[in-house]
C-alpha cells in the first residue's frame, strides 16, 4: 500500500524542470522540483553528465517529502547551454520521471540486448590485459563496438559492448555466451590471483556504463586493498581533503576540498549512493582548479 501511495503522489506531482539562461551571467541555471524518492539526486546528475555538462555550482535540498535542486552548468567550452536539442533532452528525461534501470550491484557478467551484447568483468590488472581480452573476443568472432575500463589498486573492471561478426547484432546463443564467459574467465584469472575474476549472466536492464563501473568496483571492494607503492613517494598535498563530522542530531556532515575535474560530483554521488547514504542537503562550488563540497 505504501508503494502504491508513493506512486500516486508522484503521478499527482510530476517533476518540474526550469532551464534559465537569464539569471546568471556566465552559466545556465537548471532547477529541478520533484517529489522526493531514493536515488533521485543521482538520476538528475547522471542526465547532466550524459550531455557532458560541467556543474559549476549546486544547491541540494531533499529533506522531507520534496526534492529541490539548483545547478549552475556550462558546456565543455565554458559557455551557456543554447542548444535546443540538449535543453529538450534534459527536460524530457527529468520531467517524465523516467527511472533508471534497477540496481545491478549483485551481478557481473554478459547480457545481450537487441543491438549488442554487454560484457562486464573484473579481475587482477596487469600489462596487456585488455589486449588479451580483445584477442579472445576476436577469435570468437566478436566485434568490439565500444568499451570502457577502469583500474584501481591492482584491480580492473570493464564494460564492453560487442556484436556478432557475421550479423552485426547481439549474440544470443546461450552456448556461445557460455563459451565467451569461460574463456574470458581464464584470461582474467591470470596467475597467482588471490581473488577470482567474475563473469556471470546479468539480469536485464540498461545502465550508464560509468554508473555500472562504479557499482562493479564497489562490489569488488577494491577500496579495501592498499595500493603497492614500492620505491614511490606519495605526494599527500595533492590528495583530496575530506572531513566527516557528526555535529547535528540527524545528519553527518561531509566536507570535501579537492582539485576539480570532469564528473567529480557524479563520482561522489555514485559512491555515496552505493554506500547506502542519502544526501539531504548539499552545496557545491568550483573555482578554476578546485572544488568545494559540503553535504
Image (cartoon, helix red, strand yellow):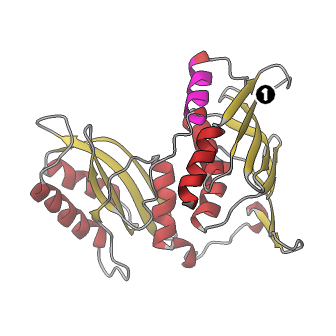
- Left or right: residue 217 versus residue 239 is left
Name the residue beneath numbered marker 1. Answer: 27
Given residues 12 and 84, the one toward you in this image is 12
Q: Position of residue 202 (x, y in %)?
A: 31, 59
Magenta span: 85-94
- Left or right: residue 136 versus residue 84 is left
Question: Residue at coordinates 68% horizontally, 50% vertically from top-left?
Answer: 36
Q: Position of residue 128 (x, y in %)?
A: 34, 59
Q: Is residue 292 visible?
A: no
Question: Residue at coordinates 86% horizontally, 24% vertically from top-left?
Answer: 23
- The quarter of the image holding the N terminus is bottom right
Question: Residue at coordinates 78% horizontally, 21% vertically from top-left?
Answer: 21
Q: Secondary structure at mark 1?
A: loop
Q: Residues within 10 Å of mark 1 (few under 14, many from 20)?
A: many
- The quarter of the image holding the C terminus is bottom right
Given residues 119 and 99, the one toward you in this image is 99
In the rendered image, which quarter is residue 91 located in? top right
Q: Position of residue 158 (x, y in %)?
A: 39, 56
Q: Is residue 74 above or below residue 114?
A: above
Q: Is residue 163 visible?
A: yes
Q: Main secondary structure of the magenta part?
A: helix
Residue 132 falls within the magenta-colored stretch: no
In the rendered image, which quarter is residue 121 located in? bottom left
Given residues 142 and 295, the one toward you in this image is 295
The extreme right residue here reads: 247
Q: Is residue 138 above or below residue 55?
A: below
Q: Is residue 127 above or below residue 96?
A: below
Q: Position of residue 136 (x, y in %)?
A: 19, 55
- Left or right: residue 11 versus residue 198 is right
Amino acid at each position: 500500500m505504501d508503494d502504491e501511495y508513493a506512486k500516486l503522489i508522484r503521478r499527482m506531482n510530476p517533476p518540474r524542470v526550469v532551464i534559465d539562461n537569464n539569471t546568471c551571467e556566465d552559466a545556465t541555471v537548471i532547477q529541478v522540483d520533484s517529489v522526493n524518492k531514493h536515488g533521485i539526486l543521482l538520476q538528475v546528475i547522471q542526465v547532466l553528465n550524459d550531455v557532458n555538462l560541467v556543474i559549476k555550482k549546486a544547491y541540494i535540498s531533499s529533506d522531507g517529502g520534496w526534492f529541490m535542486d539548483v545547478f549552475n552548468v556550462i558546456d565543455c567550452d565554458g559557455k551557456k547551454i543554447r542548444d535546443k536539442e540538449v535543453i529538450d533532452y534534459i527536460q524530457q528525461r527529468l520531467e517524465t520521471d523516467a527511472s533508471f534501470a534497477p540496481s545491478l550491484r549483485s551481478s557481473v557478467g554478459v547480457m545481450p540486448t537487441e543491438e549488442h551484447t554487454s560484457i562486464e568483468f573484473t579481475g587482477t590488472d596487469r600489462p596487456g590485459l585488455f589486449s588479451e581480452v580483445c584477442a579472445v573476443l576476436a577469435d570468437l568472432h566478436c566485434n568490439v563496438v565500444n568499451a570502457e575500463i577502469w583500474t584501481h589498486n591492482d584491480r580492473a573492471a570493464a564494460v564492453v559492448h560487442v556484436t556478432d561478426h557475421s550479423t552485426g547484432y547481439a549474440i544470443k546463443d546461450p552456448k556461445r555466451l557460455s563459451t565467451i564467459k569461460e574463456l574470458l574467465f581464464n584470461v582474467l584469472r591470470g596467475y597467482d590471483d588471490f581473488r577470482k575474476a567474475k563473469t556471470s549472466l546479468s539480469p536485464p536492464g540498461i545502465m550508464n556504463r560509468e554508473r555500472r563501473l562504479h557499482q562493479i568496483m564497489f562490489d569488488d571492494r577494491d577500496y579495501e586493498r592498499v595500493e603497492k607503492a614500492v620505491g614511490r613517494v606519495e605526494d599527500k598535498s595533492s590528495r583530496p581533503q575530506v572531513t566527516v563530522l557528526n555535529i547535528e542530531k540527524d545528519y553527518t556532515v561531509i566536507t570535501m576540498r579537492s582539485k576539480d575535474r570532469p564528473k567529480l560530483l557524479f563520482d561522489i554521488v555514485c559512491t555515496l549512493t552505493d554506500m547506502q547514504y542519502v544526501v539531504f542537503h548539499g552545496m557545491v562550488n568550483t573555482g578554476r582548479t578546485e572544488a568545494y563540497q559540503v553535504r
